[in-house]
Amino acid sequence: MITNGDLWIEHEGEGPVFATAVHAGHKVRRELLPILALDDIERSREEDPYTDYWVKVAPSWLVPTRSRFEVDLNRPRDEAVYLTPEVAWGLHVWKQPPEAEMVAKSLAEYDAFYAELETLLQHLAQHHRRFVILDLHAYNYRRQGSHKGPADPGFNPDINIGTGSLDRVRWGSLVDRFAQDLTAFDFFGQHLDVRENIKFKGRQLAQWIHTHFAESACVLSVEFKKFYMDEWTGVGEVEQIQAIRDALQSTIPGIMEELRKVR
């Protein structure tokens, strides 16, 4: 296990599957805390708790430890620091705007993360002609409150697979197999609702990888509805969190099989 200070944790193993969870982090730089308007629970509500546990289904992974409210690694660089409520779900993130120097430090973290990601994926590309990145996320579906009704399940699947920047001609069979294997998994006697590009099509990280590793990388931006936790308190249900990891683990043989078929 390797860390860069407290910016990220990473692990390099063997095999053509890599995972990230860019919104799992919760830490914020000390100099930002006095001007941050959000408390821990408010920040956590828009972060992706427990996704850092799921990355370990892959032999290689990279997980930032900093909160998206410091720098959002899944936004374009010029949008990576939330400076206005309009880019942060209407939330007033700051008591006062961060100074230019503070923003520059956050963007330096952004650049460092993508430089490290490029290095890790180059290592992967040296050993495997084709590889898959699991870009793991989570989303809220009880925004009206914990005691209010959930959002319409017709537009809020248990698992959303984002493939907006993916070449489906090349990778379509792998995407379909991944969705089928997730759907087939026995989730406490039921089957998860798995759909494609309903809530989320993937964003900066997927686009960046598909641009820089166009011939070799397939990014699956997988977003889980927060049915496995109380999104208002941050408390998770241990058995469901483990079962989601098991469901992801069940897709690895199919991913490996489909990778061998890609021309």
Image: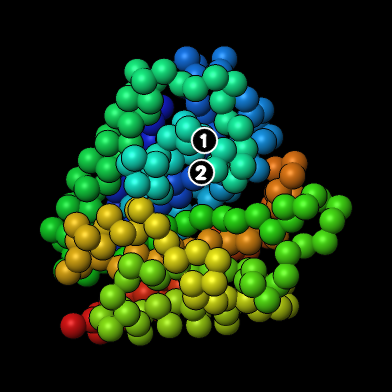
Residue at 57% from the left image edge and 55% from the top image edge: 138
The answer to whether 226 appears left or right of 146 in the picture is left
Image quadrant of residue 157?
bottom right
Q: Which residue is mark 2?
A: 87
Tag 1 secondary structure: loop
Tag 2 secondary structure: helix
Residue at 69% from the left image edge and 59% from the top image edge: 141
Of residue 94 and residue 239, the one placed in the foreground of this image is 94
Q: Amino acid at mark 2?
A: Val
Q: Which residue is mark 1?
A: 84
Q: Position of residue 170 (x, y in %)?
A: 26, 81
Q: Amino acid at mark 1?
A: Thr
For the N terminus, the quadrant is: top left
Residue 247 seen from this side: no
The answer to whether 47 appears left or right of 45 in the picture is left
Q: Are marks 1 and 2 in contact (CB under 8 Å)?
A: yes
Residue at 45% from the left image edge and 49% from the top image edge: 21
Looking at the image, how many numbered discs can be counted on the residues?
2
